[in-house]
Amino acid sequence: MAAPRKYPDELRERAIRLVLGARRDPVSRPAACRRIGDQLGINPETLRGWVNRAETDAGDRPGTTASDARRMAELEREVRELRRANAILKAASAFFASVPDWMVARRGWLVSSLPSWLVRDVPSRRVGAAGRGVA
């Protein structure tokens, strides 16, 4: 869970607008964050980070935008989830491949315990005279 925000969004937006306006003036550019941060009661480094993020999101500064970062995090989460599902399926496949065919055909418990979406794709096996599965 994210920490609660110390500064309201309105104050953040106002401070960013003031800094961006002050940076346009070459005289006040170097100390704009410090001066405006002191006036509004915001740590200058916090304000500098907000301004950098706003410039990146606007395309004025190179870097990853906030929306791109959110999308990448979402995709990374999805990839992690899919890799985990793949690992589970590989383990299940290895387990079912190791069970002898005669156990599957004779007892029926293994195939009947599988989900229906998986069983319909399993080829049916007949038990031959020697007790081995015959496709």
Image (tube, rainbow, N blue to C red):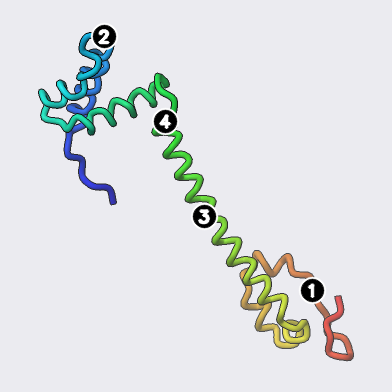
| Residue drawn at (42%, 33%) of the image | 67
Which picture quadrant has residue 128?
Answer: bottom right
Q: Which residue is mark 1?
A: 124
Task: Give the mark toward the camera: 1 or 4.
Answer: 4
Q: Which residue is mark 2?
A: 26
Q: Residues within 10 Å of mark 2 (few under 14, many from 20)?
A: few
| Residue drawn at (42%, 30%) of the image | 65
Mark closest to the chain's N terminus, 2 or 4: 2
Amino acid type, residue under disc 4 in the picture? Thr
* Residue at the extreme right of the image, as rendered: 129
Mark closest to the chain's N terminus, 2 or 1: 2
105 in relation to 10, above or below? below
Amino acid type, residue under disc 3 in the picture? Arg
Where does the image place residue 103, in percent across and percent down from the top left? Answer: 73, 86
Q: CA distance from mark 1 to mark 3?
A: 34 Å
* Residue at the extreme bottom of the image, as rendered: 130
Task: Give the mark toward the camera: 2 or 1.
Answer: 2
95 in relation to 38, above or below? below
Mark closest to the chain's N terminus, 4 or 3: 4
Task: Give the mark toward the camera: 2 or 3.
Answer: 2
Q: Are marks 2 and 3 in contact (CB under 8 Å)?
A: no
Q: CA distance from mark 2 to mark 4?
A: 27 Å
Q: Which residue is mark 3?
A: 80
Where does the image place residue 16, in percent across and percent down from the top left? Answer: 24, 22
Q: Residues within 10 Å of mark 3 (few under 14, many from 20)?
A: few
Q: Residues within 10 Å of mark 1 (few under 14, many from 20)?
A: few
Where does the image place residue 37, in percent across and percent down from the top left? Answer: 16, 26
Q: Which residue is mark 4?
A: 65
112 in relation to 30, above or below? below
Which picture quadrant has residue 56?
Answer: top left
Mark closest to the chain's N terminus, 2 or 3: 2
**Between 131 and 82, the one nearer to me in the picture:** 82
